[in-house]
Amino acid sequence: MEKANKTALTEFILIGFSGRPKSRLGLMVFMVIVYSVTVVGNGLIILVITMDYHLHKPMYFFLSNLSFLDISYSTSSVPQVIANLLVDKPTMTFSMCYLQMSSGVWLGITEGFVLAVMAYDRYIAISAPLHYMIIMSKKLCIQLAVGTWVAGLVLGVIPIYVMPAHFCGDNVIDHFACELKAIFKLICSDTSLNQVTMFTTGVLTFLGPFAFILFSYLQIVAAILRVHSAGGRLKAFSTCVSHLMVVTIFYSTAIFSYLRPQTKSVQEMDKIVSLFYGVLTPMLNPLIYTLRNKEVIRALKNLTGQKL
């Protein structure tokens, strides 16, 4: 019977803001603006890093990867959410919903690994500046970048399709999009294995990279303290500030959302948090890196001047 019910489920109904037309209109305008800024901001970062040979360094190579991830992550859900806000009863097919959910998980986990690799890059740059370009070779940078995408796929997407998940007719998702936790609440079969798998995956994909980032920054702080001049210490630390801000925003929301006890009901706080890390964070990343990075600002000015 479970199998029959599972195959009979062909679509999901999303009711994140159904019944609140004013809220839907305001949220739609907000998301259109934020998504536009996200695509333009991250796209500009990729463009200037590609065009300006002064930025052809490991640090900016990983920054361009982060920008590409942010564009992809937003595009995987935000346009669909905007379209859903235009109708009273938005629906998505079972396959499209699962595709949106798995792509979001994949890109989110990959971003966590990219941030960990960026912390390692900063550690090498500060602790071994004379050997930085030798250690962080082009080959190693490409291998690390590919490795983050593969790790996100293996640890994030594969468990979703391997875990047994039986739906028994309830297809109403109390969320804006096909988000993992919201769909998880609709499973009517025993979810013990699912919860253990989600927690294990969370530890490996969130706490693991986060612990590595903390370890890297402990080493960075130790290396900075060995610098004799105050100006040198300030310059070394300033290269890490933007990354620290992005790490703080990303991991605080991700850990709060996924590594706390789950309930069968979707709370308003879950929607707000998912809105923050799913919509706002990809927009904030380019702003944080651009406003605090003189090299990127210079490259942007040069690119603008060339176009003018």
Image (cartoon, helix red, strand yellow):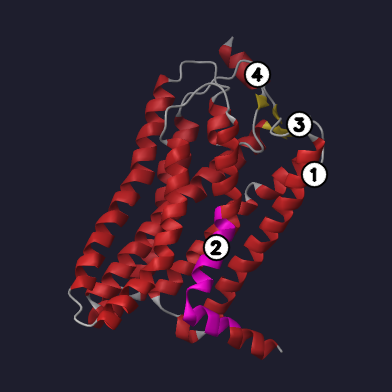
Name the element at disc 3. loop
Q: Mark 2 points at which residue?
A: 68
Q: Residue shown at 77%/44% (left/top)? A: 83
Mark 3 and mark 4 lie on one chain; the one further toward the N terminus is 3
Residue name at image x 65 percent, y 89 percent:
305
Boundaries of the magenta span: 281-300
Q: Earlier in the sequence, mark 3 or mark 1?
A: 3
Q: In this view, does 103 lie to the left or right of 203?
A: right
Q: Which of marks 1 and 4 is in front?
A: 1
Q: Distance between the residues labelled 1 and 4?
A: 27 Å
Left or right relative to 119: residue 304: right
Considering the image in quadrants, where does the N terminus appear?
Answer: top right
Dot 1 alpha-carbon crowd within 10 angstroms: few under 14, some 14 to 19, many 20 or more? some
Residue 288 in magenta stretch: yes
- Mark 4 sits on what residue? 170
- Few, some or many residues within 10 Å of mark 4 (<14, 14–19, 20+): some
Reading the image, the residue beneath label 3 is: 18
Q: Which amino acid does label 4 sit on?
A: Asp
